[in-house]
Amino acid sequence: MVNRLCVHYGEMDSVIGPLTLLKTDFGLCRIDFGPAEKILPLIKVWLKKQLITAELEYQQESIQPYIVQIDEYFARKRKLFDLPLDLFGTDFQKKVWKGLIEVPYGETYSYKDIATMIGSPKAVRAIGSANNKNPLPIIIPCHRVIGSNGSLVGYGGGLDKKEILLDLEKHPSQICS
């Protein structure tokens, strides 16, 4: 088992609704759509599935630096995140998630584009599965992945949130560096 002394969580409000953030001593490891009271049972199942034995502790101040950067993103003042991340997943999933981070702000790629980008051109379905398991939506911009025909497809937070995020990124001239 992977041992962590403590996993902290906290909440924030955003233009796409409440978000619950989870971090280890090494970095942000999960963002969930919804308030902590509804998300905590899912987080506990996820921790167990990731073989993380830890005390889960509410600590809003611990996640404050992450909230600041996410707020800046929503305010169109940030295109890139420079937060420490602690990713839990298979090697392939991590490869896909690192590829997603390379999708430029304001652009969209298809699953096939991502598959080609990471050197696995025949793994389109596996890319979709890894995309679906992305533990850090917004930070790892899975919302920038669309169907090969240009349609909006699947998003853990719902297509309405995906559309809001894509619309938010369509106006880069409003971004401050």
Image (cartoon, rainbow, N blue to C red):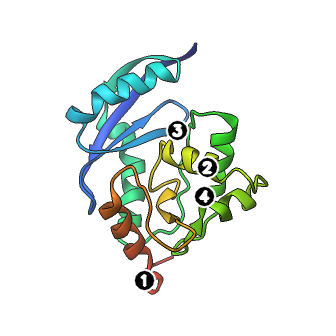
Q: Which mark is residue 101?
A: 4
The residue shown at (22%, 34%) is 38
Determine the CA span between mark 1 and mark 2.
31 Å
Q: Earlier in the sequence, mark 4 or mark 3?
A: 3
What's the distance in space between the residues labelled 2 and 4, CA to CA? Answer: 19 Å
Amino acid type of the residue tagged 1 in the rendering: His
Identity of the residue drawn at 43% across and 27% down: 46
> Which residue sits furthest left?
37
Secondary structure of the residue carrying numbered label 1: loop
* Front position in the image: 56 or 128: 128
Which callout, 1 or 3, points to the residue nearer the camera?
A: 1
**Residue type of the residue flagged with mark 3:** Gly
The residue at the far bottom in this view is 173
Q: Is residue 160 above or below residue 157?
A: below
Q: In which quadrant will I find the N terminus?
A: top right
Residue 84 visible: no
Label 2 sits on residue: 125
Q: What amino acid is found at the position of numbered circle 2 in the picture?
A: Arg
Of tags 4 and 3, the one toward the viewer is: 4
Q: Report whether 64 appears left or right of 13.
A: right
Q: Does residue 132 appear to the left or right of 44 in the view shown?
A: right
Q: Amino acid at mark 4?
A: Ile
Q: Residue at x 42, y 83 (%)?
A: 171
Where does label 3 land, which residue?
Answer: 27
